[in-house]
Image (cartoon, rainbow, N blue to C red):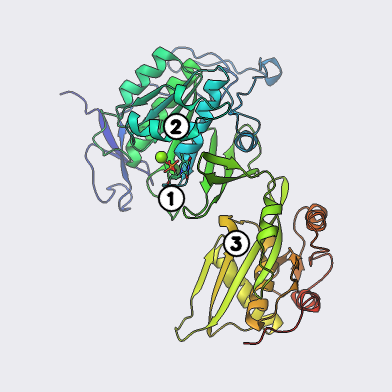
Amino acid sequence: MPKPSTIHVCSECGHAEARWHGQCPGCGAWNTLVEERAPVASARGGGGGGGGAIGRRGAAGAALTPVALRDVKATAVARLSTGIGELDRVLGGGLVPGSLVLLGGSPGIGKSTLTGMAMGNITGAGSSALYVSGEESAAQIKLRHERLEHGACRALDVPVLAETDLDAVLATIEHHRPEVCVIDSVQTLNASDLTGAPGSVGQVREVAARLMRTAKAVQTTVILVGHVTKEGSIAGPRVLEHLVDCVLQFEGERERTYRTLRALKNRFGSTSETGVFEMKQGGLVEVLDPSARFVGEATGKPGSVVLAAMEGSRPLLVEVQALVSPSEIVPPRRVVTGIDRNRLALVLAVLSRHANVGTGSADVFVNVVGGVRIDEPGADLAIALAVASAQRGIALGTENKPLACFGELGLTGELRTVGHPERRVEESTKFGLGAPVHPGSARTLRHALKAAFATAGEPVAA
Ligand code: TYD
Ligand code: MG
Protein backbone atom coordinates (compact mmCIF):
# COMPACT_ATOMS: atom_id res chain seq x y z
CA MET A 1 0.00 0.00 0.00
CA PRO A 2 1.45 3.41 -0.86
CA LYS A 3 2.22 5.64 2.11
CA PRO A 4 -0.10 8.65 2.44
CA SER A 5 1.75 11.78 1.36
CA THR A 6 0.36 13.93 4.15
CA ILE A 7 -0.22 13.46 7.84
CA HIS A 8 -2.05 15.47 10.45
CA VAL A 9 0.11 16.52 13.37
CA CYS A 10 -1.14 17.92 16.66
CA SER A 11 0.42 21.33 17.26
CA GLU A 12 0.16 20.77 21.03
CA CYS A 13 1.66 17.32 21.56
CA GLY A 14 3.06 16.30 18.18
CA HIS A 15 0.81 13.27 17.86
CA ALA A 16 0.45 12.24 14.20
CA GLU A 17 -2.66 10.81 12.54
CA ALA A 18 -3.31 9.78 8.97
CA ARG A 19 -6.69 11.52 8.93
CA TRP A 20 -7.92 14.78 10.38
CA HIS A 21 -9.68 14.66 13.74
CA GLY A 22 -11.42 17.49 15.55
CA GLN A 23 -9.94 16.28 18.82
CA CYS A 24 -6.38 15.05 19.08
CA PRO A 25 -6.42 11.37 20.03
CA GLY A 26 -3.05 11.90 21.68
CA CYS A 27 -3.66 14.73 24.14
CA GLY A 28 -7.37 15.47 23.83
CA ALA A 29 -6.90 19.09 22.67
CA TRP A 30 -9.44 20.40 20.16
CA ASN A 31 -8.72 21.79 16.70
CA THR A 32 -4.99 21.32 16.95
CA LEU A 33 -4.38 18.85 14.11
CA VAL A 34 -2.61 20.51 11.20
CA GLU A 35 -1.96 18.91 7.85
CA GLU A 36 1.69 18.47 6.99
CA ARG A 37 3.67 16.62 4.38
CA ALA A 38 4.63 13.15 5.58
CA PRO A 39 8.28 13.32 6.62
CA VAL A 40 10.78 11.82 4.24
CA ALA A 41 13.86 10.27 5.81
CA SER A 42 16.26 12.84 7.28
CA ALA A 43 14.58 16.10 6.41
CA ARG A 44 16.51 18.40 8.66
CA GLY A 45 16.25 22.18 8.37
CA GLY A 46 18.87 24.31 6.71
CA GLY A 47 19.79 26.52 9.67
CA GLY A 48 19.92 30.30 9.88
CA GLY A 49 20.56 32.87 7.22
CA GLY A 50 23.81 33.62 5.44
CA GLY A 51 27.01 32.11 6.70
CA GLY A 52 26.93 28.79 4.89
CA ALA A 53 26.73 25.36 6.49
CA ILE A 54 28.71 24.62 9.60
CA GLY A 55 30.07 21.10 9.60
CA ARG A 56 29.48 18.64 6.81
CA ARG A 57 26.66 16.19 6.81
CA GLY A 58 27.85 12.62 6.64
CA ALA A 59 25.84 9.50 5.96
CA ALA A 60 22.59 9.13 7.87
CA GLY A 61 23.31 8.87 11.58
CA ALA A 62 27.08 9.30 11.20
CA ALA A 63 28.86 11.72 13.49
CA LEU A 64 29.50 15.22 12.21
CA THR A 65 32.49 17.45 12.89
CA PRO A 66 31.61 20.61 14.77
CA VAL A 67 33.63 23.65 13.76
CA ALA A 68 35.07 26.25 16.10
CA LEU A 69 33.42 29.60 15.45
CA ARG A 70 36.86 31.15 14.99
CA ASP A 71 37.36 28.99 11.91
CA VAL A 72 33.99 29.72 10.37
CA LYS A 73 34.33 31.85 7.29
CA ALA A 74 31.79 34.66 7.47
CA THR A 75 32.17 37.22 4.77
CA ALA A 76 30.45 40.53 5.36
CA VAL A 77 27.51 40.67 2.98
CA ALA A 78 26.52 43.88 1.33
CA ARG A 79 22.93 44.78 2.03
CA LEU A 80 20.54 45.59 -0.74
CA SER A 81 18.87 48.96 -0.32
CA THR A 82 15.14 49.10 -1.01
CA GLY A 83 15.45 52.79 -1.82
CA ILE A 84 13.00 53.53 1.01
CA GLY A 85 15.01 54.97 3.90
CA GLU A 86 12.55 54.10 6.65
CA LEU A 87 12.16 50.52 5.41
CA ASP A 88 15.94 50.07 5.20
CA ARG A 89 16.33 51.37 8.73
CA VAL A 90 13.70 49.01 10.14
CA LEU A 91 15.39 46.14 8.31
CA GLY A 92 18.66 47.08 10.00
CA GLY A 93 20.28 48.68 6.97
CA GLY A 94 18.64 47.07 3.95
CA LEU A 95 17.80 43.56 2.82
CA VAL A 96 20.27 40.79 3.63
CA PRO A 97 20.81 38.63 0.51
CA GLY A 98 19.16 35.24 0.83
CA SER A 99 17.08 36.20 3.85
CA LEU A 100 13.38 35.61 4.37
CA VAL A 101 11.33 38.60 5.48
CA LEU A 102 7.71 38.47 6.57
CA LEU A 103 5.68 41.65 6.18
CA GLY A 104 2.42 41.43 8.10
CA GLY A 105 -0.46 43.87 8.28
CA SER A 106 -4.20 44.13 7.99
CA PRO A 107 -5.78 44.36 4.52
CA GLY A 108 -5.60 47.79 2.92
CA ILE A 109 -2.78 49.05 5.10
CA GLY A 110 -0.38 49.37 2.17
CA LYS A 111 1.67 46.17 2.05
CA SER A 112 1.37 45.82 -1.71
CA THR A 113 2.16 49.50 -2.13
CA LEU A 114 5.26 49.31 0.05
CA THR A 115 6.62 46.16 -1.57
CA GLY A 116 5.73 47.47 -5.02
CA MET A 117 7.69 50.66 -4.36
CA ALA A 118 10.65 48.71 -3.00
CA MET A 119 10.70 46.45 -6.07
CA GLY A 120 10.44 49.49 -8.33
CA ASN A 121 13.43 51.09 -6.61
CA ILE A 122 15.45 47.89 -6.72
CA THR A 123 14.69 47.48 -10.41
CA GLY A 124 15.56 51.13 -10.98
CA ALA A 125 18.89 50.57 -9.24
CA GLY A 126 19.73 47.78 -11.68
CA SER A 127 19.06 44.73 -9.51
CA SER A 128 16.65 42.00 -10.51
CA ALA A 129 13.29 41.65 -8.81
CA LEU A 130 10.20 39.50 -9.16
CA TYR A 131 6.73 40.30 -7.91
CA VAL A 132 4.49 37.27 -7.43
CA SER A 133 0.86 38.06 -6.74
CA GLY A 134 -1.75 35.48 -5.91
CA GLU A 135 -4.29 38.17 -5.09
CA GLU A 136 -4.39 40.48 -8.05
CA SER A 137 -4.15 40.08 -11.78
CA ALA A 138 -1.21 41.59 -13.65
CA ALA A 139 -3.57 44.29 -14.94
CA GLN A 140 -4.58 45.26 -11.40
CA ILE A 141 -0.95 45.42 -10.30
CA LYS A 142 -0.19 47.59 -13.29
CA LEU A 143 -2.84 50.11 -12.24
CA ARG A 144 -1.24 50.45 -8.84
CA HIS A 145 2.29 50.59 -10.19
CA GLU A 146 1.33 53.37 -12.58
CA ARG A 147 0.70 55.50 -9.50
CA LEU A 148 4.05 54.54 -8.01
CA GLU A 149 6.14 55.20 -11.09
CA HIS A 150 8.02 58.41 -10.42
CA GLY A 151 11.59 59.41 -9.76
CA ALA A 152 13.95 56.49 -9.29
CA CYS A 153 11.06 54.09 -8.78
CA ARG A 154 10.76 52.08 -11.99
CA ALA A 155 7.57 50.40 -10.81
CA LEU A 156 6.39 49.54 -14.32
CA ASP A 157 9.63 47.69 -15.10
CA VAL A 158 9.12 45.17 -12.30
CA PRO A 159 8.48 41.69 -13.70
CA VAL A 160 5.26 40.30 -12.25
CA LEU A 161 3.78 36.84 -12.06
CA ALA A 162 0.11 36.41 -11.21
CA GLU A 163 0.12 32.84 -9.97
CA THR A 164 -1.13 30.82 -7.01
CA ASP A 165 0.52 27.46 -7.67
CA LEU A 166 3.54 27.03 -5.42
CA ASP A 167 5.39 24.64 -7.74
CA ALA A 168 5.13 27.06 -10.64
CA VAL A 169 6.37 29.92 -8.48
CA LEU A 170 9.31 27.90 -7.18
CA ALA A 171 10.26 26.82 -10.69
CA THR A 172 10.16 30.44 -11.84
CA ILE A 173 12.38 31.59 -8.98
CA GLU A 174 14.86 28.81 -9.68
CA HIS A 175 14.94 29.65 -13.36
CA HIS A 176 15.15 33.44 -13.18
CA ARG A 177 17.06 33.69 -9.90
CA PRO A 178 15.95 37.21 -9.05
CA GLU A 179 17.83 39.00 -6.29
CA VAL A 180 14.58 39.84 -4.53
CA CYS A 181 11.20 38.22 -4.80
CA VAL A 182 7.93 39.39 -3.25
CA ILE A 183 5.19 36.87 -2.55
CA ASP A 184 1.91 38.76 -2.18
CA SER A 185 0.53 37.04 -0.23
CA VAL A 186 1.76 33.86 1.40
CA GLN A 187 -1.85 32.94 2.18
CA THR A 188 -2.83 32.77 -1.46
CA LEU A 189 -0.19 30.30 -2.63
CA ASN A 190 -1.24 26.71 -2.83
CA ALA A 191 0.92 23.64 -2.32
CA SER A 192 -0.93 21.10 -4.43
CA ASP A 193 0.20 18.07 -2.43
CA LEU A 194 -1.64 19.28 0.67
CA THR A 195 -5.41 19.08 0.72
CA GLY A 196 -5.94 22.02 3.09
CA ALA A 197 -7.30 25.26 1.64
CA PRO A 198 -4.79 28.00 0.78
CA GLY A 199 -4.21 30.12 3.87
CA SER A 200 -4.72 27.26 6.33
CA VAL A 201 -1.97 26.75 8.88
CA GLY A 202 -0.61 23.64 7.17
CA GLN A 203 -0.55 25.29 3.75
CA VAL A 204 1.04 28.51 4.94
CA ARG A 205 3.78 26.63 6.78
CA GLU A 206 4.49 24.37 3.83
CA VAL A 207 4.52 27.26 1.36
CA ALA A 208 6.92 29.27 3.50
CA ALA A 209 9.22 26.32 4.21
CA ARG A 210 9.55 25.39 0.55
CA LEU A 211 10.05 28.99 -0.52
CA MET A 212 12.77 29.27 2.09
CA ARG A 213 14.58 26.18 0.82
CA THR A 214 14.50 27.40 -2.77
CA ALA A 215 15.42 30.95 -1.82
CA LYS A 216 18.44 29.89 0.24
CA ALA A 217 19.57 27.62 -2.57
CA VAL A 218 19.53 30.35 -5.21
CA GLN A 219 20.36 33.21 -2.78
CA THR A 220 17.15 35.10 -3.48
CA THR A 221 15.79 37.39 -0.80
CA VAL A 222 12.12 36.64 -0.30
CA ILE A 223 9.62 39.08 1.14
CA LEU A 224 6.51 37.24 2.21
CA VAL A 225 3.45 39.43 2.53
CA GLY A 226 0.96 38.11 5.05
CA HIS A 227 -2.46 39.32 6.13
CA VAL A 228 -3.03 39.76 9.81
CA THR A 229 -6.53 40.21 11.12
CA LYS A 230 -7.48 43.05 13.46
CA GLU A 231 -6.87 40.74 16.41
CA GLY A 232 -3.30 40.25 15.21
CA SER A 233 -3.20 36.51 14.79
CA ILE A 234 -5.32 33.78 13.15
CA ALA A 235 -3.92 31.00 11.02
CA GLY A 236 -1.47 33.11 9.17
CA PRO A 237 1.78 34.92 9.49
CA ARG A 238 2.20 34.25 13.18
CA VAL A 239 2.83 30.56 12.56
CA LEU A 240 5.80 31.60 10.42
CA GLU A 241 7.57 33.81 12.91
CA HIS A 242 10.07 31.18 13.98
CA LEU A 243 10.88 30.29 10.39
CA VAL A 244 11.71 33.67 8.90
CA ASP A 245 14.70 35.92 9.59
CA CYS A 246 12.76 39.09 10.01
CA VAL A 247 9.15 39.92 10.86
CA LEU A 248 7.91 43.38 9.97
CA GLN A 249 4.54 44.63 11.08
CA PHE A 250 2.77 47.37 9.18
CA GLU A 251 0.26 49.10 11.44
CA GLY A 252 -2.15 51.97 11.51
CA GLU A 253 -5.76 52.63 10.72
CA ARG A 254 -6.78 52.22 7.14
CA GLU A 255 -8.75 55.47 7.18
CA ARG A 256 -5.88 57.47 8.63
CA THR A 257 -2.91 58.67 6.73
CA TYR A 258 -0.11 57.66 9.10
CA ARG A 259 1.21 54.13 9.16
CA THR A 260 4.02 52.72 11.24
CA LEU A 261 6.35 49.94 10.27
CA ARG A 262 8.17 48.07 13.00
CA ALA A 263 10.30 44.98 13.29
CA LEU A 264 8.94 42.35 15.68
CA LYS A 265 11.88 40.07 15.02
CA ASN A 266 15.12 40.72 13.21
CA ARG A 267 18.06 38.35 13.00
CA PHE A 268 20.12 41.05 11.30
CA GLY A 269 19.28 44.16 13.27
CA SER A 270 17.45 45.77 16.14
CA THR A 271 13.77 45.11 16.76
CA SER A 272 13.14 48.53 18.17
CA GLU A 273 13.27 50.63 15.01
CA THR A 274 10.10 52.16 13.68
CA GLY A 275 9.38 53.85 10.41
CA VAL A 276 6.49 56.27 9.92
CA PHE A 277 4.78 56.61 6.56
CA GLU A 278 1.96 58.60 5.13
CA MET A 279 -0.30 57.27 2.35
CA LYS A 280 -0.54 59.77 -0.46
CA GLN A 281 -1.66 59.75 -4.08
CA GLY A 282 1.69 58.54 -5.39
CA GLY A 283 2.18 55.84 -2.77
CA LEU A 284 3.73 55.85 0.68
CA VAL A 285 5.80 58.84 1.70
CA GLU A 286 8.27 58.66 4.55
CA VAL A 287 7.53 61.00 7.41
CA LEU A 288 11.03 62.03 8.32
CA ASP A 289 10.13 64.21 11.24
CA PRO A 290 6.99 62.74 12.76
CA SER A 291 7.39 64.65 16.05
CA ALA A 292 7.03 68.00 14.29
CA ARG A 293 3.86 66.79 12.57
CA PHE A 294 2.23 65.42 15.66
CA VAL A 295 3.09 68.38 17.87
CA GLY A 296 1.91 70.80 15.21
CA GLU A 297 -1.43 68.99 15.09
CA ALA A 298 -1.87 68.71 18.87
CA THR A 299 -5.04 70.46 20.00
CA GLY A 300 -4.02 71.64 23.47
CA LYS A 301 -7.65 71.22 24.57
CA PRO A 302 -8.82 69.53 27.80
CA GLY A 303 -7.98 65.83 27.53
CA SER A 304 -4.93 66.33 25.34
CA VAL A 305 -1.29 65.88 26.31
CA VAL A 306 1.86 65.16 24.35
CA LEU A 307 3.70 61.95 25.14
CA ALA A 308 7.46 61.95 24.71
CA ALA A 309 7.77 58.35 23.59
CA MET A 310 10.70 56.32 22.35
CA GLU A 311 10.20 54.55 19.06
CA GLY A 312 13.21 52.33 18.88
CA SER A 313 16.31 54.43 18.97
CA ARG A 314 14.59 57.72 18.31
CA PRO A 315 12.31 59.87 20.41
CA LEU A 316 8.84 60.57 19.08
CA LEU A 317 6.33 63.11 20.33
CA VAL A 318 2.72 62.00 19.92
CA GLU A 319 -0.53 63.45 21.13
CA VAL A 320 -2.60 61.33 23.52
CA GLN A 321 -6.25 62.31 23.81
CA ALA A 322 -8.85 61.25 26.34
CA LEU A 323 -12.58 61.76 26.62
CA VAL A 324 -14.43 61.09 29.86
CA SER A 325 -18.18 61.08 29.53
CA PRO A 326 -20.85 60.19 32.14
CA SER A 327 -22.44 56.86 31.34
CA GLU A 328 -25.49 54.85 32.32
CA ILE A 329 -23.92 51.67 31.11
CA VAL A 330 -22.63 49.22 33.71
CA PRO A 331 -19.77 48.55 33.44
CA PRO A 332 -18.92 51.76 31.58
CA ARG A 333 -17.07 51.60 28.31
CA ARG A 334 -13.28 51.63 28.00
CA VAL A 335 -12.30 52.25 24.42
CA VAL A 336 -8.68 52.63 23.31
CA THR A 337 -6.87 53.20 20.04
CA GLY A 338 -3.12 52.90 19.88
CA ILE A 339 -2.55 51.69 23.44
CA ASP A 340 -3.17 48.49 25.31
CA ARG A 341 -6.62 48.25 26.89
CA ASN A 342 -5.27 46.58 30.03
CA ARG A 343 -2.85 49.44 30.46
CA LEU A 344 -5.79 51.86 30.55
CA ALA A 345 -7.51 49.72 33.19
CA LEU A 346 -4.37 49.86 35.32
CA VAL A 347 -3.97 53.61 34.91
CA LEU A 348 -7.64 54.25 35.78
CA ALA A 349 -7.30 52.10 38.90
CA VAL A 350 -4.19 53.96 40.04
CA LEU A 351 -5.81 57.32 39.28
CA SER A 352 -8.83 56.45 41.37
CA ARG A 353 -6.94 54.88 44.26
CA HIS A 354 -3.99 57.23 44.56
CA ALA A 355 -5.09 60.53 43.05
CA ASN A 356 -8.83 60.77 43.72
CA VAL A 357 -9.65 60.88 40.03
CA GLY A 358 -12.64 58.54 39.80
CA THR A 359 -14.03 57.37 36.47
CA GLY A 360 -16.19 54.52 37.76
CA SER A 361 -19.42 55.87 36.29
CA ALA A 362 -18.04 57.33 33.09
CA ASP A 363 -17.09 56.03 29.68
CA VAL A 364 -13.40 56.57 29.00
CA PHE A 365 -11.96 56.84 25.51
CA VAL A 366 -8.23 57.14 24.94
CA ASN A 367 -6.68 57.67 21.56
CA VAL A 368 -3.12 58.04 20.32
CA VAL A 369 -3.48 60.51 17.48
CA GLY A 370 -2.28 59.78 13.97
CA GLY A 371 -2.78 56.02 14.02
CA VAL A 372 0.44 55.47 15.96
CA ARG A 373 0.63 52.51 18.33
CA ILE A 374 2.51 52.97 21.57
CA ASP A 375 3.66 49.81 23.27
CA GLU A 376 5.85 51.14 26.03
CA PRO A 377 5.14 51.64 29.75
CA GLY A 378 6.29 55.26 29.42
CA ALA A 379 2.81 56.04 28.08
CA ASP A 380 1.14 55.52 31.49
CA LEU A 381 1.61 59.06 32.72
CA ALA A 382 0.34 60.54 29.47
CA ILE A 383 -2.81 58.42 29.70
CA ALA A 384 -3.30 59.41 33.34
CA LEU A 385 -2.84 63.14 32.71
CA ALA A 386 -5.04 63.10 29.61
CA VAL A 387 -7.83 61.34 31.54
CA ALA A 388 -7.50 63.68 34.54
CA SER A 389 -7.51 66.70 32.25
CA ALA A 390 -10.58 65.43 30.39
CA GLN A 391 -12.40 64.59 33.60
CA ARG A 392 -11.84 68.04 35.07
CA GLY A 393 -12.33 69.87 31.79
CA ILE A 394 -9.05 71.70 32.25
CA ALA A 395 -6.56 72.07 29.43
CA LEU A 396 -2.96 71.31 30.39
CA GLY A 397 -0.16 73.54 29.19
CA THR A 398 -1.00 76.59 27.13
CA GLU A 399 -2.59 76.83 23.73
CA ASN A 400 0.57 76.81 21.64
CA LYS A 401 2.58 74.88 24.18
CA PRO A 402 0.80 71.63 25.06
CA LEU A 403 2.02 69.75 28.12
CA ALA A 404 4.58 67.03 27.46
CA CYS A 405 5.13 64.07 29.76
CA PHE A 406 6.33 60.49 30.06
CA GLY A 407 6.72 57.89 32.81
CA GLU A 408 5.50 54.54 34.02
CA LEU A 409 2.95 54.27 36.82
CA GLY A 410 3.58 51.87 39.68
CA LEU A 411 0.69 50.20 41.46
CA THR A 412 1.34 52.24 44.59
CA GLY A 413 0.99 55.51 42.73
CA GLU A 414 4.70 56.16 42.27
CA LEU A 415 6.28 57.22 38.99
CA ARG A 416 8.88 54.85 37.65
CA THR A 417 11.73 55.76 35.36
CA VAL A 418 11.70 54.59 31.76
CA GLY A 419 14.47 54.33 29.19
CA HIS A 420 16.26 57.35 27.68
CA PRO A 421 14.82 60.16 29.85
CA GLU A 422 17.40 62.68 28.57
CA ARG A 423 16.53 62.09 24.95
CA ARG A 424 12.82 62.47 25.63
CA VAL A 425 13.36 65.72 27.54
CA GLU A 426 15.62 66.93 24.73
CA GLU A 427 12.99 66.16 22.10
CA SER A 428 10.26 68.06 23.98
CA THR A 429 12.46 71.12 24.41
CA LYS A 430 13.51 70.92 20.78
CA PHE A 431 9.90 71.23 19.68
CA GLY A 432 9.21 74.11 22.04
CA LEU A 433 7.13 72.21 24.58
CA GLY A 434 9.29 73.11 27.58
CA ALA A 435 10.28 70.69 30.29
CA PRO A 436 8.02 67.63 30.38
CA VAL A 437 6.50 66.19 33.55
CA HIS A 438 8.39 62.96 34.15
CA PRO A 439 9.70 60.68 36.92
CA GLY A 440 12.77 62.89 37.28
CA SER A 441 10.61 65.91 38.13
CA ALA A 442 7.76 64.27 40.04
CA ARG A 443 8.02 61.25 42.31
CA THR A 444 4.39 60.24 42.45
CA LEU A 445 1.28 60.54 40.33
CA ARG A 446 -0.06 63.12 42.78
CA HIS A 447 3.03 65.27 42.33
CA ALA A 448 2.77 64.90 38.56
CA LEU A 449 -0.89 65.97 38.57
CA LYS A 450 -0.04 68.96 40.71
CA ALA A 451 2.78 69.99 38.39
CA ALA A 452 0.59 69.45 35.33
CA PHE A 453 -2.38 71.42 36.59
CA ALA A 454 -0.08 74.21 37.72
CA THR A 455 0.58 74.84 34.01
CA ALA A 456 -3.13 74.97 33.26
CA GLY A 457 -5.41 77.90 32.64
CA GLU A 458 -8.97 78.25 33.92
CA PRO A 459 -11.43 75.34 33.78
CA VAL A 460 -13.46 75.33 30.59
CA ALA A 461 -17.10 76.04 31.43
CA ALA A 462 -19.17 72.90 31.01
P1 TYD B 1 -2.52 48.22 -0.71
O1 TYD B 1 -1.06 48.46 -0.80
O2 TYD B 1 -3.15 47.43 -1.80
O3 TYD B 1 -2.83 47.52 0.70
P2 TYD B 1 -2.58 45.97 1.14
O4 TYD B 1 -1.73 45.31 0.13
O5 TYD B 1 -1.91 46.07 2.49
O6 TYD B 1 -3.91 45.34 1.28
O7 TYD B 1 -3.26 49.64 -0.68
C1 TYD B 1 -3.73 50.29 0.46
C2 TYD B 1 -4.58 51.48 0.14
O8 TYD B 1 -3.78 52.56 -0.27
C3 TYD B 1 -5.59 51.29 -0.98
O9 TYD B 1 -6.88 51.45 -0.41
C4 TYD B 1 -5.34 52.39 -1.96
C5 TYD B 1 -4.41 53.32 -1.26
N1 TYD B 1 -3.38 53.92 -2.14
C6 TYD B 1 -3.17 55.30 -2.13
O10 TYD B 1 -3.82 56.04 -1.41
N2 TYD B 1 -2.18 55.83 -2.95
C7 TYD B 1 -1.42 55.04 -3.76
O11 TYD B 1 -0.55 55.56 -4.48
C8 TYD B 1 -1.66 53.63 -3.77
C9 TYD B 1 -0.84 52.73 -4.64
C10 TYD B 1 -2.63 53.11 -2.93
MG1 MG C 1 -2.29 43.80 -1.21
- Report which residue position mark 3 lands on: 368
- Report which residue position mark 1 lands on: 233
Tell me if I can see residue 443 in this picture: yes
Side (left or right) of 98 relative to 143: right
Alpha carbon separation for disc pair 1 and 3? 22 Å
Q: Position of residue 119 (x, y in %)?
A: 50, 27
437 vs 376: above or below: below
Residue at horizontal 35%, vertical 41%? 201
Q: Are marks 1 and 3 in contact (CB under 8 Å)?
A: no
Q: Residues within 10 Å of mark 3 (few under 14, many from 20)?
A: many
Q: Position of residue 230 (x, y in %)?
A: 43, 54
**Residue type at mark 1?**
Ser
Side (left or right) of 147 relative to 295: left
Residue at horizontal 51%, vertical 32%? 117
Say which element carries label 3: strand
Q: Which circle's residue, 1 or 3, is located before the other in the chain?
A: 1
Q: Are marks 2 and 3 in contact (CB under 8 Å)?
A: no
- Report which residue position mark 2 lands on: 145
**Residue type at mark 2?**
His
**Residue type at mark 3?**
Val
